[in-house]
Structure formats: structure tokens, C-alpha cells
Image (cartoon, rainbow, N blue to C red):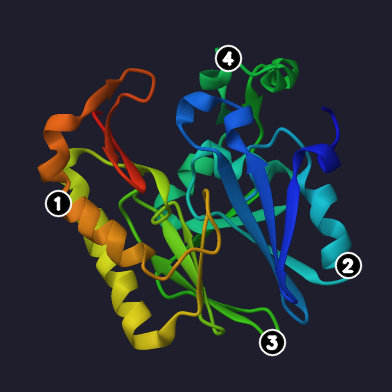
Amino acid sequence: MNKENDWFELIELNDHLLCIREKLSEVDPRFLTEYTNFFLLIGSHTALLIDTGCGLFSIRTIIEPYIRNKKLLVINTHGHWDHVGGNYEFEKVHIHEQEVNLISKPLNLTILKDSSKKIVNSLHDVSFFIPPAPIVEPLKDNDQFNLGDLNIKIIHTPGHSNGSICILTNKGELFTGDTAHFGAIFLPKRKNLSRNISSLQKLIDLQNNAGLTAIYPSHEQLPTDLRLLVDLYNGISHIEDLWENKVKNSFLHSWVIDGGEFQYIVSKI
């Protein structure tokens, strides 16, 4: 496999939304995640790319036919490698102010050197380091952008990382990044889980008051049932009930707890 068209799966969700999907398990199955989803929102004068993938293949080549002559805005939901690897293809990338420094330096992917998948061999050419975007602009909670007939709002949801954000459109579409999805959900230390719970409550309040129409997570199933936020909130809130079932995962430096629809990956560091 050496072409973008063979690697990315494109899912046209509606007349203004495209999902670009990578099979993360084919990069490194040790992350216990099957798919990474990133999104292209197409407004009347500006398109928004939400995350840029792991950087193995050109995401810009894939999205250019959809952007055409529109302006392009690029936003990272957070600074983890599988969401920011393609940043180098774009002149400017936005991320929450707490993670600007994280993506302003080359992306270190040496963690993938021991992957069982041959596709990562292409990274030997760059010594497993990918350059950053030339310009990184900070975002804050409640920042807003106009795409033409679409408006978006930034919602700061710390927990998965300090600068994790979600993105809400004026059509009630919520892009949750890694804050909420089914499957393997990566969490901070046990003592810091209250941050995740607070962020999920913030999104639940939004769902109750603003009337969400769809939830698009950055991993696995999409769109998800609107019960995702409440189910995850309840699961993390009662994680102590499952704690005795934890299994150590040395590669992830975490405890792994099977919670049915969720697999809780609780950091030890």
C-alpha cells in the first residue's frame, strides 16, 4: 500500500460533511483502537478540517477535490499523534492554547518502531519524526468561526488531555474528539477522572439544552447514538465498581478495565 486512495476510507455523511477514516489497528494494534475518524465540514466560503490523522499518507491530496476554491481552516481536537500527524501539510493549524507547545515541535513517533505492522516502515525515511505546521494558533473555550452557512463553536473539554476540545455546529452536530466515543477510551490517572466527568456533564447539559442532532467521535462508531455521553458519564463515575478487574498494560502504561461498550484505559503515569 503506497497511495492515499488505498489508505483512507471516505464516508460522505451529508451534503456538507465528509468523514476521512484511517485504520489505526493497521498502524499499531497495541493502541486497542480500530479506527480514527477525522472530518471535513464544507461551508459556503470556508471548509474546516477537524484533525489531520497520523501522517503516513497525504490528507491534503484527499480533501482538495472537496475544498475546491474555498478557504481552509484546520483545527486539532488535541495534540496526540494520531490526530496531528498531517499538520505539516498545512500552513496554519489551530489547537487549544494549552497544547500549542505540544504541536509546535516535530512529532516523535519512535513509539511505533516496534509495531508489528509493516506500514510504519515508511517512517524510517524521516527517522520517525514528522515536522509541525509552520504556524500554530491558540484556541480558547467558546471561540467561534464562520464557514459561511455553517458556524462552529469551540468547547474546552479537558480530561483525555488538558487541551482537549469538542466542536459544535449551528446544525446541532457535535464532534467530540477523544472526549467521548465507544470502544477504548483513554483516561488520565484515577485521581484526575473528575475532569472527564465534569467535561461530560458540560456536554450532557449542552445536549439537553441545545438539542444535539448527531455526535461524531474521533474513534470507532459514527455517528453514535445520543446516549453516548450519558453512558460514558455513568461508566466513568462508577469505575470504582470495576477497579478490581483491572489488567496491567505495560505498553500503554495503563490499567485496562473492560466495561462492555467501553474499555477504560486508565493511565498510571
- Residue contact at pointers 2 and 1, CB within 8 angstroms: no
The amino acid beneath tag 1 is His
Write down the residue under mark 2.
Answer: 68
Residue 109 visible to an observer of this rendering? yes
Question: Looking at the image, is mark 4 or mark 1 earlier in the sequence?
Answer: 4
Disc 3/disc 4 C-alpha distance (Å): 44 Å
Q: Secondary structure at mark 1?
A: loop
Disc 1/disc 3 C-alpha distance (Å): 41 Å
The amino acid beneath tag 3 is Asp
Task: Tell me if mark 3 has few (under 14), some (14-19) or many (20+) residues whose alpha carbon lies within 10 angstroms of its own.
Answer: few
Percent x, y for residue 42? 73, 73
Percent x, y for residue 55? 68, 37
Write down the residue under mark 3.
Answer: 149
Question: Looking at the image, is mark 4 or mark 2 earlier in the sequence?
Answer: 2
Percent x, y for residue 164? 41, 55
Question: Looking at the image, is mark 1 or mark 3 earlier in the sequence?
Answer: 3
Disc 2/disc 1 C-alpha distance (Å): 48 Å
Percent x, y for residue 259? 27, 43
Question: Looking at the image, is mark 3 or mark 4 earlier in the sequence?
Answer: 4
Question: Looking at the image, is mark 2 or mark 1 earlier in the sequence?
Answer: 2
Which residue is situated farthest in the front direction here?
260
- Residue contact at pointers 3 and 4, CB within 8 angstroms: no
Task: Tell me if mark 1 has few (under 14), some (14-19) or many (20+) residues whose alpha carbon lies within 10 angstroms of its own.
Answer: few
Question: Looking at the image, is mark 3 or mark 2 earlier in the sequence?
Answer: 2
Label number found at residue 95 = none
Q: Is residue 27 above or below residue 5?
A: above
Write down the residue under mark 1.
Answer: 238
The amino acid beneath tag 2 is Arg
Q: Nearer the viewer, mark 2 or mark 1?
A: 1
Q: Secondary structure at mark 2?
A: loop
Residue 150 located left or right of residue 105: right
Write down the residue under mark 4.
Answer: 113
